[in-house]
Image (tube, grey):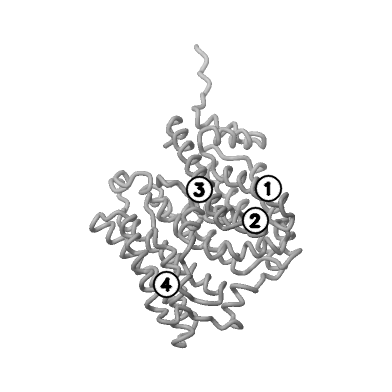
């Protein structure tokens, strides 16, 4: 009688088994990078380089209070970039987010300050206006096949005209400087106890969700990751966050405005990774026709993406008005469009569609604001900021293209 053959592992099972130990986690990460799935690695490396250079040139750059000011500035454009992630995941674009944010800011001034409408209703009106504009873009794309580049470029001009019309001859509306809204945008800091308590949540959630996932995989007789490795990741995440919070609390502390931005990032991350809608977004961005044949409501996905993008742009405009204590003709103009789109791309969202995370907006806007803040501290011309940001954006797109080619060669595109 011949001996029974020993079971063999296919390549995927071998990778999972190899990664089941603590050391295997590192090996799995190296294999992931080699296959072209770089994740947040390029952004983190870029941040380390940027922070190191600016700290050498001016030690004030990494001082706690300067970082707190940077977080305030990150929040407004970061929220707009979060909406850009939605449309980029579908391989689309929205060039009007800057103008939409300006209209959102203007609506706050017109309704709240001039007309006396309660602030919550004014904010709701701005967001609804953004949702209506986004639905128009989606309709033009779904019904008429109009490219989003053209429709949103038209929207940029139309919204800019609407902003000027609403502001009237004065061109500017000042918000009450002592109001809670302006305090939220400029002064309000999270209590240290609250910030420390909240920074414990990500590691705890990572551990609980990871253990539940591993248990489900084992129950289904599938390979599962190492519980020890998961615990180490959760512990390192918690230690890192506690260290950041401790350092920021040496200065003013964590701004509530930035906490709102991070909360929106976490909500969208859950939506992208844990819901049917998020999986459908990636499927449509990867191959819209294949997604349609699989039964996905492709038109509905486009509507949701454009509505979210314009709504986040309007909300970013509301936060910008709180930050600047005014609604003016300058709101949403200048480099707002550039920074929002660049932040999403630099953070790791693919211009080719089908790939991106909510954290792309967070990481990308930190990179851009670090460049702007560092050059301001060095008293250098804003022209350098545009050139450096453009160079970083070009590098991000090149890295994304090379990574995509690597994934194709490994059969993972």
- Which label lies toward us, 1 or 4? 1
Q: Are marks 3 and 4 in contact (CB under 8 Å)?
A: no
Q: Quadrant of residue 375?
A: bottom right
Residue at mark 2 to residue at mark 3: CA–CA distance: 17 Å
The residue where tag 3 is placed is 393
Left or right, 144 with reference to 371: left
Please give the name of the residue rendered at 51% of the width and 24% of the height, measured from the top-left corner: 8
The residue where tag 4 is placed is 103
- Estimate how packed mark 1 is, as few (under 14), some (14 to 19) or many (20 or more) residues with alpha carbons within 10 Å: some
Q: Are marks 1 and 4 in contact (CB under 8 Å)?
A: no
Please give the name of the residue rendered at 59% of the width and 37% of the height, measured from the top-left corner: 29
* Nearer-N-terminus badge (2/4): 4
Q: Are marks 3 and 1 in contact (CB under 8 Å)?
A: no
Residue at mark 3 to residue at mark 4: CA–CA distance: 27 Å
Q: Nearer the viewer, residue 9 or 307?
A: 307
Left or right, 160 with reference to 181: left
Q: Secondary structure at mark 2?
A: helix
* Nearer-N-terminus badge (3/4): 4
Q: Secondary structure at mark 1?
A: helix
């Amino acid at each position: 009688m011949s001996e029974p053959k020993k079971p063999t592992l296919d390549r995927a099972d071998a990778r999972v088994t190899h990664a089941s130990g603590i050391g295997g986690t590192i090996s799995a990460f190296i294999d992931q990078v080699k296959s072209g799935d770089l994740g947040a690695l390029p952004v983190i490396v870029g941040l380390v380089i940027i922070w190191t250079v600016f700290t050498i040139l001016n030690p004030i750059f990494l001082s706690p209070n300067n970082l707190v000011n940077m977080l305030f500035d990150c929040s407004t454009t970061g929220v707009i970039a979060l909406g850009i992630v939605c449309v980029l995941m579908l391989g689309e674009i929205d060039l009007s987010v800057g103008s939409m944010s300006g209209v959102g800011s203007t609506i706050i001034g017109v309704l709240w300050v001039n007309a006396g409408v309660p602030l919550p209703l004014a904010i709701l009106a701005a967001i609804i206006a953004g949702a209506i504009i986004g639905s128009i873009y989606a309709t033009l794309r779904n019904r008429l096949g109009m490219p989003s580049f053209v429709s949103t470029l038209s929207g940029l001009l139309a919204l800019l005209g609407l902003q000027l019309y609403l502001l009237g001859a004065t061109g500017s509306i000042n918000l009450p400087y002592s109001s809670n809204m302006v305090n939220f945008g400029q002064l309000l800091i999270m209590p240290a106890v609250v910030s420390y308590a909240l920074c414990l949540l990500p590691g705890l959630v990572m551990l609980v969700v990871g253990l539940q996932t591993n248990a489900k995989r084992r129950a289904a007789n599938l390979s599962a990751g190492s519980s020890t490795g998961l615990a180490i990741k959760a512990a390192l995440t918690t230690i890192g966050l506690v260290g950041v919070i401790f350092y920021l609390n040496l200065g003013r502390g964590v701004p509530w405005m930035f906490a709102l931005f991070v909360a929106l990032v976490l909500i969208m991350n859950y939506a992208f990774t844990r819901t049917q809608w998020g999986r459908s977004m990636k499927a449509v961005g990867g191959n819209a026709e294949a997604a349609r044949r699989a039964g996905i409501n492709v038109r509905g996905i486009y509507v949701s993406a454009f509505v979210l993008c314009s709504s986040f742009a309007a909300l970013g405009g509301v936060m910008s008005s709180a930050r600047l204590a005014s609604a003016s003709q300058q709101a949403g103009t200048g480099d707002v469009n550039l920074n929002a789109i660049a932040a999403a791309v630099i953070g790791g969202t693919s211009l080719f569609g089908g790939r991106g995370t909510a954290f792309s907006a967070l990481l990308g806007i930190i990179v851009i604001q670090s460049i702007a803040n560092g050059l301001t501290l060095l008293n250098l011309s804003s022209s350098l900021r545009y050139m450096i940001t453009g160079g970083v954006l070009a590098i991000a797109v090149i890295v994304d293209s090379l990574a995509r080619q690597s994934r194709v060669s490994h059969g993972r595109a």
